Each structure stands twice: as structure tokens, then as C-alpha cells.
């Protein structure tokens, strides 16, 4: 501990109430603030009264001792007077403010260096707020002396080391603890159970490890607990069920394993439960249905197995449920469709079987997401689903079959529709002509054949169209010219033939295109120069076609290009220097053509394979050109 000595300061003058010890401590604090963007400390002048005129300083009028120090807190946070830039370190002299009840140095990443152990001498302190700085070093063990503390906030710093087990042993009044976003190590000490008044616990992203102590169950007043984004292992303690006042429980992004304890059903006031991104196994306990207040349930990205308990249908207040990326099986529970407040269902990447229950069409208001992709669900789709308005309907990678295209689906109101790899056969689905406000359509990896219908030009809200990996055959349809909202066109691996319209890049519908993917089709002719006029283009893929002629220099005018794939064609001539030196270019491949000449000097890291099998090409990264 630093021994603080006092310089000789004369006693208070007439009308000056500031205590000499406190004044010296404050002036030393000011001296260590190297830059104060708002000039908040400019009022701290020795000849003035710290209790009367110093910004952010409040004193007890009965004894003139400083009880509150908050120099960087704006007068009106709602008026845009935000925490300005400031730099400096904490003064150990702050430990001399022995009457201090509140120390608020939340300062927008401004303070650096360690937390002085002398702060542990502030036995009257109730609020210690040092969050959102760049403080480093360990948490002082001297904090064990802060018996009256009600709020301790050290989050968003660079603190390291373990959490000292002794600091929690006598903080009986602590109601809020925040250590989030630090670089701590070790486990959460079992002494955490001594914080019997704790209501809010923030330990997100602290690099903590080990087991979660069963003493956590002693925090009977806890309403909010965030232990997410750490390295906690082993099982969720059964004692978690004792937290009867808990409303938010976040344990996501850890390494927790074993089953979800049945005791979790005792958390009757729980509104948010997030256990995602762990290694939890076993079945979902039926007690989950006892969480009558639950709004959000996230159990995705675990190793859960078995069928869903029917009790899930009891969660009548639930807004969102995500069980994706598990090994759940069985039929989809029909009673979920009766949860009137539900707006999000994500059951993707499981082993669910059977049909979609007709009750899933009961959602009368706008429904955000219904994601049943990557399961074993079969068709047909229920007629009732056509009555729903859905933001994102994803049924991809299910064996739905041809019966999916039930005639009733023509009323479907959907923003994003994904039916990739669902076994659809036949002509382009006629019922899509009657869908409303669809923006994203994915019918890739099916068995569609024939021409694209002319009515596709009527879907003017369409922003992305993916019909790749089908057997569609026609020329590139002129109907695209009506789709002025298009950003992504993916037609690869079909049987589109003919030439590409030489004015394609001048069409108004191409104005916002950022991805044009035409690969692996029997397209012939040359690459249109007008593509260089597509100012938003980032991805151009035309490999494995039958294109001839030169690579247009004008492609270099599309300055946002990041990916250009032109391999496996019959292109001739040289590589345009401007195209190869685009600032955003990351991927480039012109291999297996008939190009010739010297590869232009370029800064991008492009492998030699991207230029290979062009007998006339030479120069870096290929062998040097032969001199005449």
C-alpha cells in the first residue's frame, strides 16, 4: 500500500468549508488527469471552495467532508453532453476521502493504470463505479473492507488476475456487481454466495473458467444474472432453481455440459433464458413448461436429444424460441402453434420428422421467423400456413417433395422464402406469382426445369433471387429489367443459353446489383463491356461457360468488385491492368482460358493457380516471360 503524506495546508479560510485533507486528495487526482476534454476539472482551483464550486464534488454540509465524487458525469446525459475524451490515472490519495459514499469515475475509456489498493480504505463507500475505462492490474483484495458497498462496477476495463475470494465475504449490502468485459482468470469464488442482497450480477466475457459454484443458489434476491461468454465447464448447478426472483438468466457461450437441471422449472419469474452455445446434452426437461413468465428461450447450438416436451405449449407468454443446431427428434409439437404471442421459431438443424402441424398457420399477426431448415420434415405444407404473414420462412433441406407446391399457397405473404433442396420438381411454381412483398427467394438445388416465367418481372420487391442448381433452360430473361430492387442474381448450374445482353450493365434494374452469378451454364458470346457500369457490383462469377473474346477493360470501372471468377471459358487476349489492380479485389481467377501476354503488376495476393492453363500467359506469379 502506498503511504500517503500530506503537505502543509493552511486551515479553511472564512466561508470556506472544504476539508484540507479532502482538498489535497482532489488536487492530486486532478494532477494525474493529463487531458480533460470537457474541462470539467477547470473549476478545481485551490483558492476556491471544493464543496461549493468544484464540478462533480458534493460535501456533507455538517462537516465539510466530500461524500460524492463524479467529475466526468454530464450535467444532463440526455442533452448530448456525453462523456468527453480524457486521459489519466487514478490517484492513491483518493483513499483519504474517508467520508466518501459515491465514487463515479465512469469515463469513456479515459483512465489507465491499476486500481489503487487505497480505495479499500473508503469504508463509507456505497457506490464504486469505475467501468468503461482501460484500467489494468488486479482487483485489490482491500475491497474486502468495503462493507457498505451497494454497487460495484468495474466492467469494460483490462483487469487481470483472479477474483479475490475475500472481497465477497462481508459485502452483505451489495445489490449490483459488474465485472463484464475484462481479462480475468480462474473460477468464480464460492464466496459469491455471501452476497445475499445481490440483485444484478454481470460477469459476461471475463475469461472465467471452472465450475459454477452451487453457492450461486444462495443469491435469493437475484433478478439478473449474466455469466455468458466465459469458459465455465461442467454442469449447471441444481441450486439454480433456488433463485426464485430471477428474471434473466444468461449462460450462453460457455463450455457447460450435462443435462439442463429439472430445477430450472422453479424459476417462475424467469423471462429470458439463454443457454445457447454450450455442450449441454440429454433431453429438455418437461419442467421448462412451468416457466409461465418466459418470453425468450434460447437453447440452440448444444447437444440436446429426444423429443420436445409437450409442456412447451404451456409457455403462453413466449415471444421467441430457438432450439436450432441440436439433435432433437420426433414430431413438431402442434401446441406451439397455439402460442399467440410467439413471433420466432427456429428449429433448424435437428432431426425432426413428420409434417408441419396445421396449427403453425394460426399466427394472425406478422410473424418474424419460422425456420425449420435441415430436418426431415415432409410435405405437403398445411393450407393454414398460407394465411400467415411471415418475415422469414426457411424450409430448406427437408424432403418436402412436389406436394409442397399446394395450390393454396398462392396467398402466401412472406418476405424471405427459402425452399432450397426440398425436392421440388417441375416448372417454376405458378403460385409464386401471387405472393406479396417477397424480397428474397431461394429455390436452389431442386429439379425445376423449363423457362423462367414472364410474370417474374412482376415481383418488383425482389432483392435476391437464387435459382441455382436446377435444370432451367432459356436465355437470360428480359423480365429482369423490371426488377429494380434486385441486388443478387444467382443462376449458376442451370441450362441458360444464348448470349448475355450487351447492354445488361446499362439496365436500370442492374443499378443496385452487388452479385451477378451466371457460372456453369452454356452461355456463349463475349463478356459485355457494360458490366463495368454496375457501380455496386462486388461479385462477378462467369466461370465454366462458353464465353469468348477479350476480358473488357471496362470491368475495371466497377470499383467495388471483390470477387471475379472467369475461369474455364475460351477467353483470349490479355488481362486488363485496371481490373487486376482494383482496390477491393480479393479473389480473382481466369485459369483455363486462352489468355496471353504479361500478367500486369498487381498488389493483390493472387495464387499462380488463378492464371494457370493459359499457354500464352507469363510473368509473376507464373514463370517470367521469355525475351525475344
Image: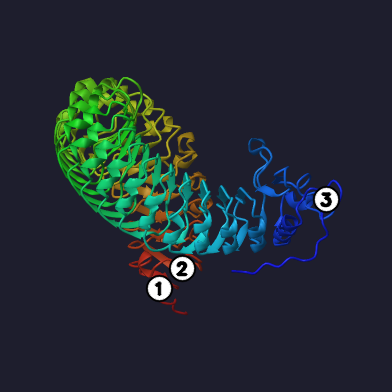
* Residue 234 on image: x %, y %: 26, 56
Tags 2 and 1 touching, CB below 8 Å = yes
Quadrant housing residue 375: top left
The residues tagged by marks 3 and 2 sit, at their Cα atoms, a distance apart of 74 Å
Q: Residue at x 27, y 48 (%)?
A: 301
Give the labeled residue for mark 3: 48
Give the labeled residue for mark 2: 599
In front here: 95 or 264? 95
Give the labeled residue for mark 1: 622
The residues tagged by marks 1 and 3 sit, at their Cα atoms, a distance apart of 76 Å
Mark 3 or 2: in front is 3
Determine whether the residue tagged by mark 1 lies in a helix, strand or loop.
loop
Left or right, 481 with respect to 297, comes to: right
Tags 1 and 3 touching, CB below 8 Å = no
The residues tagged by marks 2 and 1 sit, at their Cα atoms, a distance apart of 8 Å
Mark 1 or 3: in front is 3
Label whose residue precedes the other's in the sequence (1 or 3): 3
Mark 1: give few (<14), some (14-19) or many (20+) Cα within 10 Å.
some
Determine whether the residue tagged by mark 3 lies in a helix, strand or loop.
loop
Label whose residue precedes the other's in the sequence (3 or 2): 3
Is 536 above or below relative to 24? above
Q: Quadrant of the N terminus?
A: bottom right
Is 489 above or below relative to 461? below
Label whose residue precedes the other's in the sequence (2 or 1): 2
Q: Residue at x 40, y 47 (%)?
A: 226
In front here: 470 or 527? 470
Amino acid at each position: 500500500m502506498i503511504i500517503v503524506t500530506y503537505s502543509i495546508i493552511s486551515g479553511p479560510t472564512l466561508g470556506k468549508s472544504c476539508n484540507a485533507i479532502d482538498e489535497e486528495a482532489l488536487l492530486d487526482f486532478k494532477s494525474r488527469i493529463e487531458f480533460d476534454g470537457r474541462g470539467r476539472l477547470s473549476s478545481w482551483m485551490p483558492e476556491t471552495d471544493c464543496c461549493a464550486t468544484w464540478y462533480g464534488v458534493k460535501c456533507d454540509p455538517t462537516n465539510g467532508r466530500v461524500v460524492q465524487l463524479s467529475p466526468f458525469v454530464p450535467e444532463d446525459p440526455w442533452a448530448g453532453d456525453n462523456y468527453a475524451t480524457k486521459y489519466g490515472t487514478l490517484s492513491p490519495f483518493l483513499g483519504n476521502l474517508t467520508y466518501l459514499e459515491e465514487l463515479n469515475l465512469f469515463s469513456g475509456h479515459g483512465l489507465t493504470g491499476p486500481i489503487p489498493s487505497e480505495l479499500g480504505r473508503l469504508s463509507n463507500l456505497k457506490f464504486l463505479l469505475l467501468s468503461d475505462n482501460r484500467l489494468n492490474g488486479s482487483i485489490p483484495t482491500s475491497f474486502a473492507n468495503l462493507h457498505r458497498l451497494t454497487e460495484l462496477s468495474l466492467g469494460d476495463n483490462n483487469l487481470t488476475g483472479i477474483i479475490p475470494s475475500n472481497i465477497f465475504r462481508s459485502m452483505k449490502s451489495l445489490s449490483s456487481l459488474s465485472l463484464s468485459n475484462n481479462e480475468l482468470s480462474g473460477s468464480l469464488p464460492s464466496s459469491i454466495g455471501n452476497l445475499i442482497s445481490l440483485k444484478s450480477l454481470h460477469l459476461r466475457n471475463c475469461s472465467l473458467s471452472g465450475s459454477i459454484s452451487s453457492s450461486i443458489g444462495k443469491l435469493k434476491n437475484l433478478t439478473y444474472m449474466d455469466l455468458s461468454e466465459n469458459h465455465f465447464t461442467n454442469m449447471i448447478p441444481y441450486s439454480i432453481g433456488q433463485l426464485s426472483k430471477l428474471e434473466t438468466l444468461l449462460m450462453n457461450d460457455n463450455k457447460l455440459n450435462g443435462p439442463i437441471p429439472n430445477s430450472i422449472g422453479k424459476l417462475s419469474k424467469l423471462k429470458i433464458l439463454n443457454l445457447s452455445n454450450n455442450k449441454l446434452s440429454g433431453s429438455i426437461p418437461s419442467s421448462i413448461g412451468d416457466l409461465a413468465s418466459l418470453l425468450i428461450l434460447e437453447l440452440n447450438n448444444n447437444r440436446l436429444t429426444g423429443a420436445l416436451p409437450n409442456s412447451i405449449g404451456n409457455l403462453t407468454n413466449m415471444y421467441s424460441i430457438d432450439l436450432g443446431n441440436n439433435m432433437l427428434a420426433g414430431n413438431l409439437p402442434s401446441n406451439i402453434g397455439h402460442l399467440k404471442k410467439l413471433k420466432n421459431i427456429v428449429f433448424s438443424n435437428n432431426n425432426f420428422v413428420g409434417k408441419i402441424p396445421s396449427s403453425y398457420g394460426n399466427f394472425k399477426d406478422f410473424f418474424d421467423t419460422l425456420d425449420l431448415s435441415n430436418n426431415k420434415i415432409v410435405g405437403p405444407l398445411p393450407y393454414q400456413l398460407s394465411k400467415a404473414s411471415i418475415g422469414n420462412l426457411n424450409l430448406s433441406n427437408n424432403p418436402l417433395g412436389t406436394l409442397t407446391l399446394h395450390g393454396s399457397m398462392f396467398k402466401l405473404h412472406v418476405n424471405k422464402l427459402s425452399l432450397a433442396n426440398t425436392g421440388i420438381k417441375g416448372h417454376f411454381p405458378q403460385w409464386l406469382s401471387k405472393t406479396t412483398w417477397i424480397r428474397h427467394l431461394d429455390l436452389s438445388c431442386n429439379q425445376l426445369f423449363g423457362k423462367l416465367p414472364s410474370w417474374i418481372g412482376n415481383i418488383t420487391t425482389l432483392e435476391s433471387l437464387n435459382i441455382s442448381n436446377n435444370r432451367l433452360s432459356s436465355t437470360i430473361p428480359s423480365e429482369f429489367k423490371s426488377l429494380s430492387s434486385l441486388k443478387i442474381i444467382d443462376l449458376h448450374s442451370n441450362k441458360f443459353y444464348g448470349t448475355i445482353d450487351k447492354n445488361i450493365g446499362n439496365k436500370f434494374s442492374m443499378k443496385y446489383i452487388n452479385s451477378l452469378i451466371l457460372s456453369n451454364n452454356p452461355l456463349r458470346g463475349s463478356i459485355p463491356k457494360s458490366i463495368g457500369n454496375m457501380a455496386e457490383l462486388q461479385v462477378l462469377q462467369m466461370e465454366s461457360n462458353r464465353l469468348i473474346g477479350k476480358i473488357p477493360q471496362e470491368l475495371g470501372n466497377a470499383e467495388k468488385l471483390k470477387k471475379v471468377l472467369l475461369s474455364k471459358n475460351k477467353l483470349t487476349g490479355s488481362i486488363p491492368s485496371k481490373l487486376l489492380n482494383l482496390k477491393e479485389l480479393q479473389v480473382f481467377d481466369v485459369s483455363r482460358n486462352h489468355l496471353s501476354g504479361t500478367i500486369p503488376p498487381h498488389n493483390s495476393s493472387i495464387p499462380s493457380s488463378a492464371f494457370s492453363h493459359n499457354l500464352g500467359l507469363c510473368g509473376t506469379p507464373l514463370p517470367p516471360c521469355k525475351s525475344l
